[in-house]
Image (cartoon, rainbow, N blue to C red):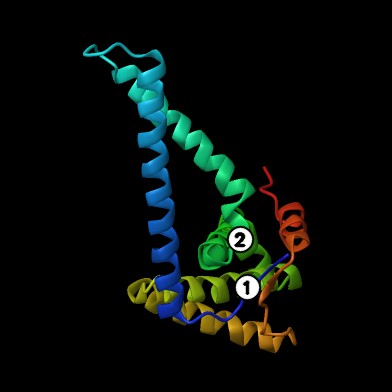
C-alpha cells in the first residue's frame, strides 16, 4: 500500500539530482571498465573492437540493473527517487483504469471516489515535486469539484493511501460491457 508523504519540493529535486548524478557516474565508470576489460580479453590490438566495447556497455547496463535492485534501491540517498518512482507507478495504476474510475465516481461508488481523490492528491504532489505548475493549474478545478462530491457523500477527503483492492473493485464493477 503506497502512502503520500509530505516532501519539500526543493529538497526532493536536490536529492533526485544527486542520486541521478551518482548513478550516472557509477554507470560511466562501469561501462568504461567493462569495455576496457572486454577489449583486453577478447580484442585485437589495433583492430576493430567495437563489438567488445558495445558488449562492455551492455554488461554495464546489466550490472547496473542488479545494483539498483540489490543495493542502491535501499540506500538513504535514493529515498527521494524511490518515492517519486513509487508515486508515479501508483498514479499510473489508476490512469490505466481511469475510464472505469470516472464511471464509478459518476455512479458515486465509494472505492472509485476514493481512488479519484487519491489520484488528484498524488498528481498534485507530483506536479509540485517536479515543479510542473502549468499542469497543476488544470487539475485544480476538477479536484475541487470532486472534493465537494466526496464530502457530500460523507467520505474522508484525506485519501493519502492507495489501497490496491480499490483498483480491483473498480475494475470488476465497471469493466467495459458490450
Q: Which secondary structure lies at badge 1?
A: helix
Between 13 and 28, the residue placed more toward the observer is 28
The disc at residue 48 is none
Q: Position of residue 31 (x, y in %)?
A: 39, 36
Which residue is found at the position 76% from the left and 56% from the top? Answer: 173
Vertical position of residue 32 compared to residue 112: above or below: above
Hey, which quadrant is residue 109 in on the image?
Answer: bottom right
Q: Residue beneath label 2, please?
A: 90
Mark 2 residue crowding within 10 angstroms, few (<14) / some (14–19) / many (20+): many
Mark 1 or 2, nearer chain start: 2
Residue 99 appears in the figure:
no
Real-space Cα distance between discs 1 and 2? 10 Å
Asked if disc 1 and disc 2 are in contact, CB closer than 8 Å, the reply is: yes
Hey, which quadrant is residue 28 in on the image?
Answer: top left
Location of the N terminus (image quadrant): bottom right
Residue 78 appears in the figure:
yes
Amino acid at each position: 500500500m503506497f502512502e503520500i508523504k509530505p516532501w519539500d519540493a526543493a529538497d526532493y529535486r536536490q536529492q533526485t539530482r544527486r542520486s541521478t548524478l551518482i548513478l550516472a557516474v557509477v554507470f560511466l565508470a562501469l561501462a568504461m571498465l567493462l569495455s576496457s576489460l572486454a577489449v583486453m580479453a577478447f580484442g585485437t590490438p589495433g583492430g576493430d573492437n567495437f563489438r567488445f566495447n558495445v558488449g562492455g556497455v551492455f554488461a554495464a547496463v546489466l550490472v547496473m540493473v542488479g545494483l539498483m535492485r540489490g543495493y542502491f534501491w535501499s540506500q538513504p540517498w535514493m529515498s527521494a527517487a524511490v518515492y517519486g518512482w513509487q508515486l508515479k507507478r501508483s498514479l499510473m495504476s489508476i490512469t490505466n483504469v481511469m475510464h472505469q474510475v470516472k464511471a464509478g465516481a459518476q455512479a458515486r461508488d465509494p472505492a472509485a471516489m476514493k481512488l479519484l481523490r487519491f489520484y488528484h492528491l498524488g498528481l498534485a504532489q507530483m506536479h509540485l515535486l517536479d515543479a510542473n505548475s502549468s499542469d497543476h493549474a488544470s487539475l485544480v478545478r476538477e479536484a475541487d469539484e470532486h472534493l465537494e462530491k466526496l464530502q457530500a457523500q460523507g467520505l474522508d477527503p484525506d485519501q493519502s493511501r492507495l489501497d490496491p483492492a480499490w483498483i480491483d473493485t473498480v475494475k470488476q464493477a465497471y469493466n467495459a460491457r458490450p
